[in-house]
Image (spheres, grey):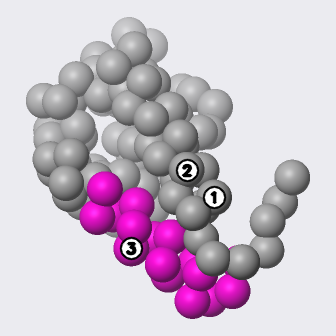
Amino acid sequence: MPIALSPLQSLKLWHDVHLDLVHQGGDLSSRQIAILLTIYLEPPPHTVRGLARKLNVTKPVVTRALDTIGKLGLVSRRRDEADRRNVVIQRTVAGALAVERLGDMIMARAKELPR
């Protein structure tokens, strides 16, 4: 069921969720979160090249973001056996759980918004 938010409510939700992430020790930038959500919300396969094209950034930008996301265990990378030039990004259980927690956090904060 879609909810209608005013611009102020939308900003309050964005603010509150980001504060929660900071308080929980979240180390991901907006770009890293966008990459993570793209990997988990859109059907695979995902490649560095494809993510760079989708987000309109360079492959090194995606690679640096994936370095951080990978160190946290939220994704893994492997060479594409069919085309060794491609790096395939794979989901992990830890990443799926983190994305699910983020969704839960957003829902909980949205319920707290004044109507």
The one nearer the camera, 113 or 81, is 113
Badge 3 density bin: few <14, some 14–19, many ≥20, Cα 10 Å = few
Q: Residue furthest right?
A: 1
| Residue under pointer 1 | 111
Q: Looking at the image, tell me whether mark 2 or mark 3 is earlier in sequence order.
A: 3
| Residue under pointer 2 | 108
What amino acid type should be assigned to the residue bearing mark 2?
Ala
Q: Are marks 2 and 1 in contact (CB under 8 Å)?
A: yes
Measured in 3D between alpha carbons, the distance from the residue under mark 3 to the one under mark 1, in whole angstroms, is 14 Å
Badge 1 density bin: few <14, some 14–19, many ≥20, Cα 10 Å = few
- SS category of the residue bearing label 3: helix
- Residue at image position (37%, 26%) is 95
Residue 76 magenta = no
Query: 72 above or below 8?
Result: above
**Does 101 sit left or right of 43 as displayed?**
left
Q: Are marks 3 and 1 in contact (CB under 8 Å)?
A: no
- Residue at image position (30%, 28%) is 74
- SS category of the residue bearing label 2: helix
**Does 44 sit left or right of 96 as displayed?**
right
Q: At which x and y percent is residue 78?
A: 29, 17
| Residue under pointer 3 | 15
Q: Looking at the image, tell me whether mark 3 or mark 1 is earlier in sequence order.
A: 3
Instruction: Tell me which secondary structure the magenta stretch mostly adopts.
Output: helix
Query: 60 above or below 74?
Result: below
| The magenta segment | 5-20
Residue 50 seen in this snapshot: no
What amino acid type should be assigned to the residue bearing mark 3?
His
Quadrant position of the C terminus in the picture: bottom right
Measured in 3D between alpha carbons, the distance from the residue under mark 2 to the one under mark 1, in whole angstroms, is 5 Å
